[in-house]
């Protein structure tokens, strides 16, 4: 068996990947600059650039080096090699972005939803958002990442409807809804998990491999990060803390979500927390009691997480979580087991986390085509 050709194709493919990833980091570069960055010889890089240009993955920008010495041409990724779709499904509506391999937003659209929009209306809006963005980018949508304000079945990507969930969209299934508009795989995960990834990549949990992220907003959620990975659980329900028992008004044991009912801090005819009412309740002259009750309840939820997963720190995010950091930290410090409690720092964390993964997956999809280009074009 002649192994020379397969081996040569593999080497070409590896070189092509180095070239593409260099340009993904630098956006544009000459062949000499790519050779210097990769440590690969200039002739080998020149062959790779030619292959990738002929296959449509790279383009000559028309820019040239200046100054003394040989004039070099600048190359960059082609603008028609596709984009990634990033979608957030939240109580306020569906927001979508098309991003390129550099993370730049090429197009953006959103559609508001009523709180009781339901599964059918949300599905319609999701498909419309994807269709709109697919029509605004050249090269199509090559992959999609979805952030959903509900638990997500890790096997199917469908949303999981739990009792008393504040966001009522049933068992919405984004994967088949997006398939007509996206050429590649669709990844769906819970919004709190995406927020934790964003905080780990560029927030208060940077460099921390074991932590919990509590989302405290209209809904309640927790992401568990262990050994640098978000743990989703068997069915995708890890971190669903709404029904975890903690101390409520009067020190009574009750599900976490019921604490807010006991304090009169829910929206009418809903289990959603009234964030505006909560903020009013925990500020001002009469705030001591509600603030203390909430801090104690959050501390109880954190103690359960500390006991089970042994985090290094706890990050409080969401609409009102960061406001209670001093109170929660003070209560937690008096417990036998405690960890530092810090406020989340990343702005718009759900989309930020999902966008970063979408860019990674888009880059991987682009690089995957190098095997074809390496075998399709003979070396000169």
Image (cartoon, helix red, strand yellow):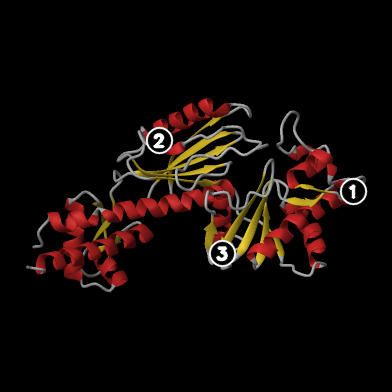
Residue 97 place in picture, x, y as percent: 46, 40
Indicate which disc residue 293 carries. Answer: none
Quarter of the C terminus within the rendering: bottom left
The residue under label 2 is 176
Residue 182 place in picture, x, y as percent: 36, 39
Front-lying residue, 236 or 352 = 236
Query: Which quadrant would residue 378 be assigned to in this image?
Result: bottom left
Instruction: Please tell me which residue is depicted at 75% across the width and 51% down the height of the picture.
Output: 245
The residue under label 1 is 250
**For residue 37, above or below residue 121:** below
328 to the left or right of 98: right
Residue 237 place in picture, x, y as percent: 57, 49
Query: Which quadrant would residue 225 be assigned to in this image?
Result: bottom right
Residue 185 place in picture, x, y as percent: 37, 45
Instruction: Please tell me which residue is depicted at 35% across the width and 54% down the height of the picture.
Output: 363
Pointer 3 or 2: first along the chain: 2
Give the distance between the C-alpha atoms of the residues marked 3 and 2, in whole angstroms: 31 Å
The residue under label 3 is 226
243 to the left or right of 7: right
- Whether tag 1 and tag 3 are in contact, CB under 8 A, the answer is no
Local secondary structure at mark 3: strand
Pointer 1 or 2: first along the chain: 2
């Amino acid at each position: 068996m002649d192994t020379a050709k397969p081996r040569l194709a593999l080497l070409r493919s590896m070189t092509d990947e180095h070239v593409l990833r260099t340009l993904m980091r630098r956006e544009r570069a000459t062949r000499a600059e790519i050779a210097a960055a990769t440590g690969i010889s200039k002739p080998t890089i020149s062959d790779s650039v030619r292959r990738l240009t002929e296959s449509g993955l790279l383009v000559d920008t028309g820019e040239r080096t200046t100054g003394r010495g040989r004039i070099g041409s600048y190359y960059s990724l082609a603008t028609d090699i596709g984009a990634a779709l990033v979608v957030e499904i939240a109580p306020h509506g569906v927001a979508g972005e098309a991003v390129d391999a550099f993370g730049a937003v090429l197009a953006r659209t959103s559609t508001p939803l009523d709180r009781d929009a339901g599964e059918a209306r949300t599905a319609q809006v999701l498909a419309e958002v994807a269709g709109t963005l697919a029509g605004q980018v050249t090269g199509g949508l090559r992959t999609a990442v979805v952030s959903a304000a509900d638990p997500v079945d890790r096997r199917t990507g469908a949303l999981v409807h739990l009792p008393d969930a504040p966001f009522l969209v049933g068992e919405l299934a984004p994967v088949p809804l997006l398939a007509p508009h996206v050429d590649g795989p669709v990844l769906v995960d819970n919004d709190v998990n995406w927020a934790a990834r964003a905080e780990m990549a560029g927030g208060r949990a940077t460099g921390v491999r074991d932590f919990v992220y509590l989302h405290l907003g209209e809904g309640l959620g927790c992401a568990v990060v262990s050994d640098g990975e978000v743990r989703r659980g068997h069915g995708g329900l890890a971190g669903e803390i709404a029904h975890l028992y903690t101390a409520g008004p009067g020190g009574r044991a009750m599900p976490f979500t019921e604490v807010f009912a006991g304090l009169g801090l829910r929206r009418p005819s809903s289990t959603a927390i009234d964030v505006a009412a909560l903020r009013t309740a925990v500020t001002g002259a009469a705030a001591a009691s509600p603030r203390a009750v909430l801090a104690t309840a959050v501390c109880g939820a954190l103690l359960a997480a500390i006991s089970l997963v042994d985090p290094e720190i706890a990050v409080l995010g969401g609409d009102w979580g960061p406001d209670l950091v001093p109170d929660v930290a003070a209560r937690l410090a008096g417990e036998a087991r405690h960890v530092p409690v810090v406020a989340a720092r990343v702005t718009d964390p759900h989309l930020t986390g999902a966008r970063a993964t979408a860019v990674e997956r888009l880059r991987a999809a682009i690089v995957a085509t190098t095997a074809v280009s390496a075998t399709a074009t003979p070396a000169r």
